[in-house]
Amino acid sequence: MNIKRVGNVILAVKDLDKSIAFYHELLGLPIKNQRRTWVDLGQTGALLSLHPAGLTADHSANNLEGGIVVGFLVGDVKSAMDELKSKGVKVHREIMDREAGKNAIVLDPDGYMVSLFEPKFADSDQQSKGYHGFTPA
C-alpha cells in the first residue's frame, strides 16, 4: 500500500443545508463540488465532504477522547472566535494557549467538534501577521 495523502474527511450530517451554511457561509470554505446528497468543501489538500446521515444513525461522540474533530488552521484564533460567537456558534472549549499554539473548539450544527488552531513558529517571520477571522495561516 502506498497512500499519498488524505483525500477527504466525510461527515454524516443531520441537515445538509445547515451544515453547508456553517462550513461554507460561516467558516468560508469554498464549495468544490455539490450534488443533491454530497458536498465537497475546500480547494487544495484534503476536502471536507458532507452527506446526509441515516435517520437512525448515532454520531453523538463529541469528545476529544473518542469523537470526531475537524481541525482548521487560522491566522488569529481570537478574532475567529469573536466572529463565531457573534454569529451564535456554540463554543465547546475556549482558547487555550499550548506549546505549539493557541487552540479553541466550537461545535457545528450536528455537534461535531471544530478545532481552530493558531500555530506558534520558532521563527517569528513565519508567524501570521494581520490575519483576521478565518484567513488561512
Image (spheres, helix red, strand yellow):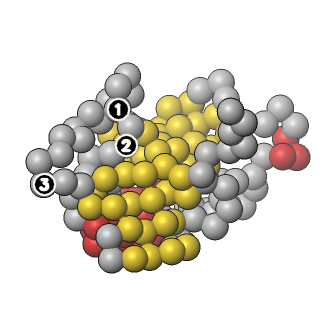
Query: Horizontal placement of 94 versus 19: left or right?
Result: right
In the image, what residue type sits under mark 1? Answer: Gly
Whole-percent x, y for residue 130 in the image: 72, 61
Q: Which residue is mark 3?
A: 55
Q: Is residue 72 above or below residue 58?
A: below
Whole-percent x, y for residue 55 in the image: 12, 54
Is label 2 in contact with label 1 (beta carbons under 8 Å)? yes
Marks 3 and 1, how far apart at CA: 20 Å
Dot in front, 3 or 1: 3
Query: Horizontal placement of 32 versus 121: left or right?
Result: left
Dot in front, 2 or 1: 1
In the image, what residue type sits under mark 3? Answer: Leu
Q: In which quadrant of the rendered view does residue 105 lie?
A: top left
In the image, what residue type sits under mark 2? Answer: Met
Q: Residue at x 33, y 77 (%)?
A: 36
Whole-percent x, y for residue 71 in the image: 52, 44
Marks 2 and 1, how far apart at CA: 8 Å
Q: Earlier in the sequence, mark 3 or mark 1?
A: 3
Q: In which quadrant of the rendered view does residue 63 lie?
A: top left
Q: Which residue is mark 2?
A: 113
The quadrant of the rendering that contains the C terminus is bottom right
At mark 2, the secondary structure is strand
Q: Earlier in the sequence, mark 3 or mark 2?
A: 3
